[in-house]
Amino acid sequence: MRVLSGIQPTGRFHWGNYFGAIQQYIALQNNEQSFYFIADLHALTSVRDRKQLEDNVWDAAVDLLALGLNPDQAALFRQSDVPEVTELMWLLMTVTQFSLLEKCHSYKDKVAKGIAADAGLFTYPVLMAADILLYDSDIVPVGADQIQHLEVTRDIAQRFNSIFGGEFLHLPNARVLEEGAKVPGTDGEKMSKSYGNTLEIFEAEKPLRKKIMSIKTDSTPMEAPKNPDTCSIYTLFKLFSTLEQQAALADRYRAGGMGYGEAKQALFEAAMSYFADARAKRAELVANPAYVEEVLQAGAKKARAKGQQVLQRVQEACGLKGRRA
Ligand code: ADP
Ligand code: TRP
């Protein structure tokens, strides 16, 4: 089994990224081969500031390692350190229907919001297909919003195979973790950088507490019984707690006499304790940048070795590199 996933360095990671994606990477890293990369080329479709992108990529690497990504098990690398991926992207583009990309939410949603689309945004799913197909990936752990991109990837691979007549590209499968499928943000909507409603994994204690205290609730008075199942504080608390802890907090909601402030405090404490080890590990990594860079270089080397094999197979399939002498 070959597992692969990528994450965009477009800002600091939040709880939605962790429970929707990062946790799955880490759980799957013990597979025979696993590749995890920081999608810096994809991030260029939205981050247009050199320093910002460099910092984001670096923070992403440090965060992933702090959260338990083990470089002895998994190759961790920068997408742009494997240039083969952009060549494969071109080969895939030549078999990708325009109409397939027009259907993609990633593009449609931005256009609907009035964002002028460039070719990078429009062809974003083809680069993602190249990311996946370059390594003969079997399983791609992602959040639910990426399922469509996996379907596009399979579509492109099938079209390439059928045009050139062979199993040149290996069809991948998405792996979606249902439970964390939609982590709510401080306003109750899906947590997302673009909505400014995030709770960041490595946010300093004080601002984190402040943000948790700002989570939107209904106006049920303190004495009245409350419904935990419609409350985003409780939904978030469940991510960090045992079944017993969840049952205990749910009982307190239903009994009445507990204000939302208390539930928020419980959430804050549960989150701090859940990420305590990762915070300590992060501090160590920040003090040792040479080690982090070494991990990224070793990861890229491993990824390129596999990527070069697949690219060659694909180039030959479509008649490139057909030297006569
Ligand atoms: P954002 O929406 O904050 O820009 P990304 O689109 O970069 O986040 O998401 C990176 C990964 O994290 C994706 O696999 C995505 O599905 C997952 N993810 C993001 N937000 C959430 C959320 N609120 N709940 C579950 N998973 C999420
Ligand atoms: N598009 C993905 C996201 O926004 C990131 C990504 C890029 C990715 N390439 C990938 C994820 C390949 C999985 C596999 O979350």
Image (cartoon, grey):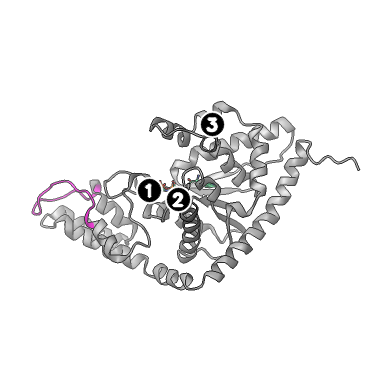
Nearer to us in this view, 301 or 190: 301
Question: What stretch of residues is rendered in magenta?
Answer: 213-229
Q: How would you rate the neighbour count of disc 3 (Cα within 10 Å): few for under 14, some for 14-19, many for 20 or more?
A: many
Q: Can you give x and y, in whole percent of width and height, for residue 191 in the image?
A: 34, 48
Q: Can you give x and y, in whole percent of width and height, for residue 142 in the image?
A: 48, 48
| Lower position in the chain sequence, tag 2 or tag 3 | 2
Q: Position of 230 compared to 107: left or right?
A: left
Q: CA distance from mark 2 to mark 3?
A: 22 Å
| Lower position in the chain sequence, tag 2 or tag 1 | 2
Q: Given contact means CB atoms under 8 Å apart, are the residues at marks 2 and 1 in contact?
A: yes
Asked if residue 319 is among those painted magenta in the image, a careful observer would answer no
For disc 1, the marked residue is 193
Q: Is mark 2 within 8 Å of ligand 1?
A: yes
* Residue in the picture at 59% in, 44% down: 172
Q: Is mark 1 within 8 Å of ligand 1?
A: yes
Q: Amino acid at mark 1?
A: Lys
Q: Nearer the viewer, mark 2 or mark 3?
A: 2
Q: Amino acid at mark 2?
A: Thr
| Lower position in the chain sequence, tag 1 or tag 3 | 3
User: Which label was assigned to residue 101?
Assistant: 3
